[in-house]
Image (cartoon, rainbow, N blue to C red):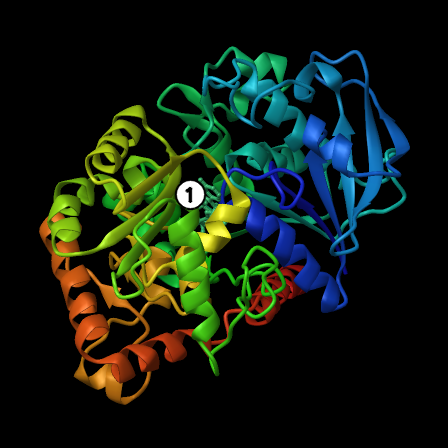
Amino acid sequence: MRVLFTTSEVFPLIKTGGLADVSGSLPAALQHLGVDIRLLIPGYPAVLNQLSHLKPIAKLENLPMLAQADLLLGEIAQTKVKVMVIKAASLYERDGGPYADANGLEWLDNALRFGILSKVAAMLSGAHSPLSDWQPDIVHCNDWQTGLTPAYMKLLEHSSAKSVISLHNMAFQGCFAPAWLSTLALPHRNFAIDGFEYHGQLSFLKAGIFYADSVTTVSPSYAKEIQTAEFGFGLEGLLSQRGNEIKGILNGIETSEWNPNTDPHLIKNYNAKSLTGKKQVKRALQEKLALHTNANAPLLGVVSRLTHQKGLDMLVPIMQTLVDAGCQFALLGNGETALESAFRALALNNPGQVSVTIGYNEALSHQIMAAADLFIMPSRFEPCGLNQMYGLAYGTPPVVNATGGLADSVTDTNLISFKNKTANGFVMSEASSASLLSAIKQALNVYTNDAAAWRQIQINGMSQNLSWDKSALAYLATYQALLEA
Ligand code: ADP
Ligand code: GLC
């Protein structure tokens, strides 16, 4: 089976969030299952610099607004997954991130940048594609950036391949002015409710959901939630037409990257049998972040984009109370300016107890995950969430809101779950500061007063199988069902 997996970010080449983690791991897991898989990604500078031995395999011609572009082929060293790269300097070779410039302003031509990504994926799947003799049976798209692919496949390329779109976040839809229709050579007759029109705009995500042969999302709970007005971001109607067809497949974690027993970012490794290394990692992080080196102070960790989705504004009003009760905080993240300032102020007012690092730092994210006693993730919605699973693997019980993949991966600690050894974290009863405080207090109560119970909760999480194996099998079954249909 040949699968083309198209995505706008992939770890370790380029990452802004969990989509990169998934795009790094899932194709590798599918390759282990015998799937002949290739990635298709834009040639950002970080991609071109990190992939050595890229070789040109085709000239890309007749693309919208582009005199010339090249299709290159390379391989990701760590996983040996083959990757096709679109080299188009005018579109992708810029300073800044994949979606925005260094100041966070979205690129004004994102419709073109990701329209071309979508178009090339579709061209590769066309019958007798002149681009490559490697023809996929399945084209697997991810999020709005690749949402036009299924539309191009059905309407223009007359592709015989089947398309799948995975929804990682309904909050981002890729809506653009209708003038882009002509630029992107999309048929005007499909700019309609049964097509890619959404409130007068061209919606990449709607196109994906409408034209894909199969729709998946990244947790069973989110698959249900997005069919409601609260979580569907306006597309709940279309999604509920596909109803039970939408498969929720929980993400896994990359156990070669996220394993406390082998993690090279830690001064000491540890595992479920011996957690002493975790204490040393905590002390080292306290020193590094200028926190008081107090082994008994509960250390609360946060690694996150600082956006409304992640609910960390609910943490701000209760942080001082927790600090006054003896807690320490190690926070790493970036995003909304108001939230960044609020956390910075808390750090200034509480030297030795609150550390706030604004920015993106892979090594520090591992160190916080390992050093912290509790991981705080009060998301208002969370399609899957990977950080809570990293917390489970690192013996850092997560405190989460009961939504999406958080609800599907974290079991609240109570008498029953403790007895049957499924308790692995603490779950808020609703998305509010009061509820977050109460869940954290419950956790602290066990942490401070019952070391044996705390260790059991840590071990319950650490001994779960969070690897990609099971999820990759579910994607394979999805592909097989499409090919047999
Ligand atoms: P989302 O994709 O919505 O941001 P996930 O939990 O799925 O949420 O994935 C977030 C990923 O990005 C994780 O791998 C996390 O460690 C990483 N991450 C988020 N913010 C930072 C940061 N400031 N520095 C380093 N890694 C970060
Ligand atoms: C999105 C979601 C996150 C999910 C990730 C990977 O960024 O916000 O919940 O884990 O995609 O699927």
- Residue 315's place in the image compared with 188, above or below, is below
Where is residue 242? Give x, y as percent: 42, 52
Residue with the mark numbered 1: 169
Please name the residue shown 65% across and 18% down the image.
94
- Residue 220 location, quadrant: bottom left
Where is residue 329? Give x, y as percent: 28, 49
Q: Is mark 1 within 8 Å of ligand 2?
A: yes
149 vs 55, nearest the viewer: 55
- Residue 15's place in the image compared with 178, above or below, is below
Where is residue 397? Give x, y as percent: 33, 66
Residue 385 in view in this figure: no
4 left or right, relative to 10 = right
Please name the residue shown 56% across and 50% down the image.
21
How many numbered marks have been drawn onto this rendered protein structure? 1
- Residue 73 location, quadrant: top right
Please name the residue shown 86% across and 36% down the image.
54
- Label 1 sits on a secondary structure element that is loop
- Which part of the image, by quadrant, shows the N terminus? bottom right
- Crowd rating for badge 1 (residues with CA inside 10 Å; few <14, some 14–19, many 20+): many
Where is residue 275? Give x, y as percent: 44, 75
369 vs 41, nearest the viewer: 369
480 vs 333, nearest the viewer: 333
